[in-house]
Image (cartoon, grey):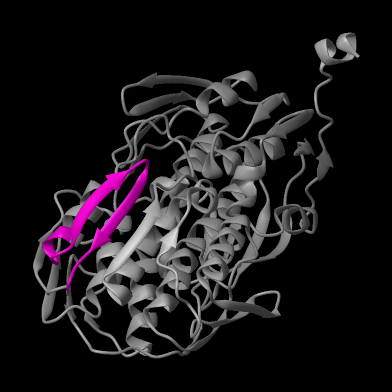
Amino acid sequence: MEKFIIRGGKSLHGDINISGAKNAAVAILPATLLAKDVFTIENVPDIRDISSMLQILEALGADVRYLSKSTIRIDTRNVRSQTVPYDLTKNLRASYYLLGAMLGMYNNAQVAMPGGCNFGGVRPIDLHLKGFSALGALISTDGGVIEAKASRLIGASVYFDKVSVGATINVMLAAVKARGLTILENAAREPHIVDLANFLNLMGANIKGAGTDVIKIEGVGTLHGCDYSIIPDQIEAGTYMVAAAATAGDLMIKNVIPKHLEPITAKLRECGAYVEEFDDAIRVQATGRLHSCNVKTLPHPGFPTDMQPQFTVLLTVCEGMSIVSDSVWDNRFKYVDQLTRMGAQIQIEGRSAIVQGTAQLKGAPVKADDLRAGAAMIIAGLVAKGTTEIEEIVHIDRGYEDVVLKLTAVGADIQRVDVQPPVDVQRIKRA
């Protein structure tokens, strides 16, 4: 077990390079199962979720080799298994994409219910299963294992009752080799959905409309390997943008697509930060205390729910009162208890948080409740006076590459240290 120790109160200055997008990579890697061929994928983030997904591909029979820290060669020609056990899916929410990929390839898939972040409630995959059923798959569950099978998938019209990134991606994966035309309506429009569609089209798929709310997929008979480079991570970039503003710093954030960051940029400017856009970089600068603003998360191109905890930390030290509303998940404010330990003044009312800005947070022992909440705790620690210790950082490692190295290089005082396991007093007495 490990934890982060942060000595706060230091402004961040310098350059940070952004890694490949986690949310794109965890969809693109399972998509390699749709062809028995060789793939070279670049700009793959070196994070725990990717390690977990690659373990699963190897367990299914794929040969996985790193050509460099961020470039992976995947050979799927010897993949045979269509069953993924729970011990490989329990820590990876995105493991459900294996259902769509293997269903699309083999017309059969068995995947244990996925794990990942817990936002304080159930994160159902009913929209995924509805889409598979529309394509002709029979769905059953037994002992926490989902099985989807069909004699042959047939294209169909699928309307998502709610905009869902996961369901959009999963049904895309299943439909690329289905017979005929599949139309996905009320589809999600996130950048990583466009990236997956581009990857699949390079494999030989016929997908049109990705990035809009109607995606049309004409099924093809076979797909093939390809070389591909994953887009930069929108949420990692946004996290460092907010960290620059919160610490009254000046960061040049490189290897980004500024258009993907527009909702975050707009809110930072509304708070009074200076944001300058370049072709593949973005600079965020703040001097002094910023002022409050209201934030409501929405499906893309709205403000991303994955940036809500980080931005809320910024608002805790802004002047005035802000209201943060999350319309995407029912309960994504679990982390607020950690912030109140540090002196934040936040009141939760349903799906909204009322934030009264305070001049200073104070260091305290906290934990990472989930991936993005963990990123929020890092920003809080950077801002706070004194020392902050963050436990359960395994969540942070799921989505942020080299976070200590990147932050240390721009002036942060952050360390990763081992946590000594608690002493078992009863066991000592028995001995």
Query: Does 118 sit left or right of 203 as displayed?
Result: right
Residue closer to the observer: 291 or 220: 220
Q: Quadrant of residue 213?
A: bottom left
**Residue occupying image coordinates x 58% and y 76%:** 43
Query: In the displayed structure, would residue 301 be above or below residue 182?
Result: above
**Residue, far left:** 157
Q: Is residue 163 visible?
A: no
Q: Is residue 149 visible?
A: yes
Quadrant in which the C terminus appears: top right
Q: Quadrant of residue 375?
A: top right
**Residue occupying image coordinates x 40% and y 26%:** 353
Q: Quadrant of residue 138?
A: bottom left
Residue closer to the observer: 81 or 413: 81
**Residue occupying image coordinates x 70% and y 34%:** 390
Query: Does 404 sit left or right of 87 as displayed?
Result: right
- Residue 305 appears at what percent x and percent y? 39, 46
Would you say residue 140 sits in the magenta stretch?
yes
- Residue 350 appears at what percent x and percent y? 31, 23
Query: Does 110 sit left or right of 430 as displayed?
Result: left
| Residue range (magenta) | 133-151
Query: Does 296 sit left or right of 406 as displayed?
Result: left
Query: In the displayed structure, would residue 285 be above or below residue 246?
Result: below
Quadrant in which the N terminus appears: top right
| Count of labels in the image | 0
Query: In the displayed structure, would residue 329 be above or below residue 75?
Result: above
Residue closer to the observer: 190 or 48: 48
- Residue 205 appears at what percent x and percent y? 28, 86
- Residue 136 appears at what percent x and percent y? 13, 65
**Residue occupying image coordinates x 26% and y 73%:** 210
Would you say residue 187 sits in the magenta stretch?
no
